[in-house]
Amino acid sequence: MLQLHALTPNITKYLANMLLIVATFFSLVACTENKLQFKAIDITGADYARDFAADGAMLDPDGKPRAIRDFAGKIVVVFFGYTQCPDVCPTTMSELAEVKKLLGKDGDKVIGLFITVDPARDTPEVLKAYTANFSPDFIGLTASSPEALAKAVKEFKIYYKKVPGKTDTSYTIDHTAASYVFDTQGKVRLYTRYGSGAPALAADIKQLLK
């Protein structure tokens, strides 16, 4: 009896520890289940692609400086390209326009920002007309200087390179074919590859809007 009595505190402590372990396990499982599962690459908390590097670095076709914070309450999709791009850019913009339709009323909460890597040919007038072809609320942005563009592409880890054509103005540009998605608080959340399709992006945006 004395031996059993001596073991009782140890058994109690053991059972208490086991209960704590079980509770912790189920807590971790619950957290895993509650974590959003995206079709695009989740880059929440990334230390890059946070904004356009500096205030006044990007201008809309009306010459107004723009930043991610200007679109608080909206889902912002950022894409770098150029208006004379033969395939990737128009496909991406068309898919984003389709995303807005798939979201129904929530489509109004999605803004597309098209940042040109070809400021020599993509004048404000050209950019305005180009984005309007896809959606009236898409906005074309131009870097305020070559230095500003260099900072922006570095911040967003964008690659682009001019490929000479038959004439000085018929060149093409190889560039990163992917988009960044920001949530309604202006935080970068997703990296979506080219060709992922409108339904996949629409599903991800629905989760971000919850």
Image (cartoon, rainbow, N blue to C red):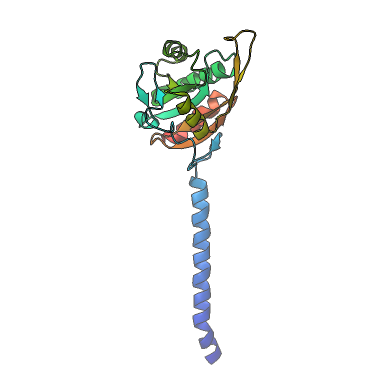
* Of the pair 14 and 156, the residue shown nearer to us: 156
* Of the pair 14 and 143, the residue shown nearer to us: 143
Can the viewer see residue 114?
yes
**Outermost residue, top direction?**
167
Q: Examine the rendered structure and indicate whether residue 6 appears above or below residue 44.
A: below
- Within the image, what quadrant is residue 92 found in? top right
Q: Examine the rendered structure and indicate whether residue 188 appears above or below residue 128.
A: below
- Within the image, what quadrant is residue 208 found in? top left
Percent position of residue 93, x then y: 51, 19
Q: Residue at x 48, y 37 (%)?
A: 189
Percent position of residue 74, x then y: 38, 29
Q: Is residue 120 left or right of residue 167?
A: left
Task: Give the number of callouts.
Answer: 0
In the picture, the quarter occupied by the C terminus is: top left
Percent position of residue 133, x then y: 46, 11
**Outermost residue, bottom direction?**
2
Q: Residue at x 49, y 56 (%)?
A: 27
* Of the pair 117 and 70, the residue shown nearer to us: 117
Can the viewer see residue 176?
no
Q: Residue at x 53, y 78 (%)?
A: 11
Q: Examine the rendered structure and indicate whether residue 110 appears above or below residue 27.
A: above
**Outermost residue, right direction?**
166
Percent position of residue 76, x then y: 43, 28
